[in-house]
Image: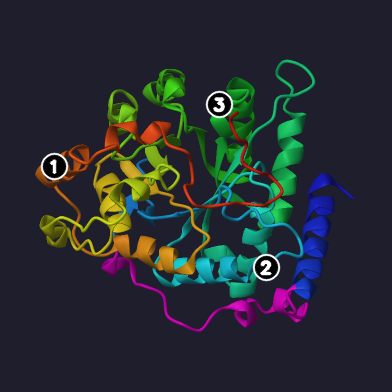
């Protein structure tokens, strides 16, 4: 049995075990329609779509992040994650971003995407975070790749990214081989810390990537200096993490009403206000807010509908936020105010 056959056997066995855990028969493997949810999904003509520059393929401009949110320990309640995914998909969402570093996020995505019958319809963005036993060793990346495929119940990953530039030279080289072999469709690199943007920018500027993922929000606009302009120049798609600054932006606007002009772009909530500002940038392909709350997911995905702000409106939105007390100190605020996570990977606390 070769490596490909061995991997397929392992994936099929994993699928059967997960289906049993979800209370579904293995017949669902042979009849995908058994797993499909009934409600109709939003039509692409009704929502904001963005083109991936390299191919022209269009994806919805609001995706779903899974950091912390989808890391739920075995045996703990997690049905809310199924509802989050269902609302996301039915609202037109397709891009889901995850990583092996996010605890059980890959497992939960794989289980519920299959249970909902939407596995093949999703655009999965995953990551690789490995070094190796010696310089240039790509074997660890290979092992992590196959494990992610098993967890996600996929035979191809749409986008694979070098997580936080870890071992980037080796990992990007390996990903280029995967792309040639058809294991992945796109490749990229990521980082969420602006202090590393000077290192990530050259990757974009030399046109070596299909995607780059960076932090960008009303409060953190460092990506505008080099990365976003370079992405436009080189035809690199941009995925945006931390659009809400780990919920800190909601702390700033708590108790405040939206400005009257927000209705001009169809914003009904602060979440939509923050997201529409981001995805209206011409370089941005998709923003990936994370949530554990189905109601918040419905709010986020609603930002796909209605008009986007133009350049003048974007400036007006920014000025409105800059006038709020504490806005200039968002980055120094505690992350996830009022929230707790108890997954496999717990958020580290600074002393």
Image quadrant assignment for residue 184: top right
The residue carrying pointer 3 sits among few (fewer than 14), some (14 to 19) or many (20 or more) residues within 10 Å by Cα, namely many
Farthest right residue in view: 1
| Residue 193 in sight here | yes
Q: Nearer the viewer, mark 1 or mark 2?
A: 2
Q: Position of residue 94 (x, y in %)?
A: 46, 60
- Mark-to-mark CA distance, 3 and 1: 32 Å
Could you say whether the residue bearing mark 3 is in a helix, strand or loop? helix
**Closer to us: mark 2 or mark 3?**
2
* Residue extent of the magenta highlight: 22-47
Seen at 59% across and 73% down, the residue is 117
Asked if 47 appears above or below 39 in the picture, the reply is above
Q: Nearer the viewer, residue 46 or 322?
A: 322
Q: Position of residue 171 (x, y in %)?
A: 63, 28
Q: Quadrant of the C terminus?
A: top right
Q: Is residue 291 magenta?
A: no
**Label 3: which residue?**
165
Q: Tell me, yes or no, if residue 200 can be seen here.
A: no
């Amino acid at each position: 049995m070769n490596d490909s056959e061995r991997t397929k056997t392992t994936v099929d066995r994993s699928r059967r075990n997960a289906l049993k855990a979800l209370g579904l028969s293995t017949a669902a493997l042979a009849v995908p329609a058994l797993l499909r949810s009934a409600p109709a999904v939003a039509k692409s003509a009704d929502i904001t779509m963005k083109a991936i520059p390299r191919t022209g393929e269009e994806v919805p401009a609001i995706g779903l992040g899974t950091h912390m949110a989808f890391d739920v320990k075995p045996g703990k309640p997690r049905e809310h994650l199924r509802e989050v995914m269902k609302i996301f998909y039915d609202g037109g969402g397709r891009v889901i971003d995850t990583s092996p570093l996010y605890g059980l996020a890959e497992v939960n995505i794989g289980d519920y995407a299959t249970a909902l019958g939407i596995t093949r319809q999703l655009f999965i963005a995953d990551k690789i975070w490995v070094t190796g036993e010696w310089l240039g060793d790509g074997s660890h990346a290979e092992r992590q790749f196959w494990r992610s495929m098993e967890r996600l119940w996929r035979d191809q990953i749409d986008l694979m990214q070098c997580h936080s530039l870890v071992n980037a030279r080796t990992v990007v080289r390996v990903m280029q081989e995967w792309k040639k072999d058809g294991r992945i469709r796109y490749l990229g690199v990521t980082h969420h810390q602006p202090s590393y943007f000077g290192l990530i920018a050259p990757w974009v500027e030399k046109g070596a990537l299909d995607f780059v993922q960076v932090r960008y929000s009303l409060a953190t606009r460092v990506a505008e200096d080099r990365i976003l302009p370079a992405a436009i120049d080189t035809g690199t798609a941009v995925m945006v993490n931390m659009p809400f600054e780990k919920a800190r932006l909601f702390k700033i606007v708590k108790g405040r009403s939206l400005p009257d002009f927000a209705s001009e772009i169809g914003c009904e909530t602060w979440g939509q206000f923050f997201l529409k500002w981001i995805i209206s940038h011409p370089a941005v392909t998709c923003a990936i807010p994370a949530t554990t709350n189905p109601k918040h997911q419905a709010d986020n995905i609603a930002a796909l509908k209605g008009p986007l702000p133009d350049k003048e409106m974007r400036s007006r939105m920014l000025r409105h936020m800059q006038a709020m007390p504490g806005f200039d100190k968002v980055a120094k605020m505690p992350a996830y105010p009022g929230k707790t996570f108890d997954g496999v990977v717990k958020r580290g606390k600074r002393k």
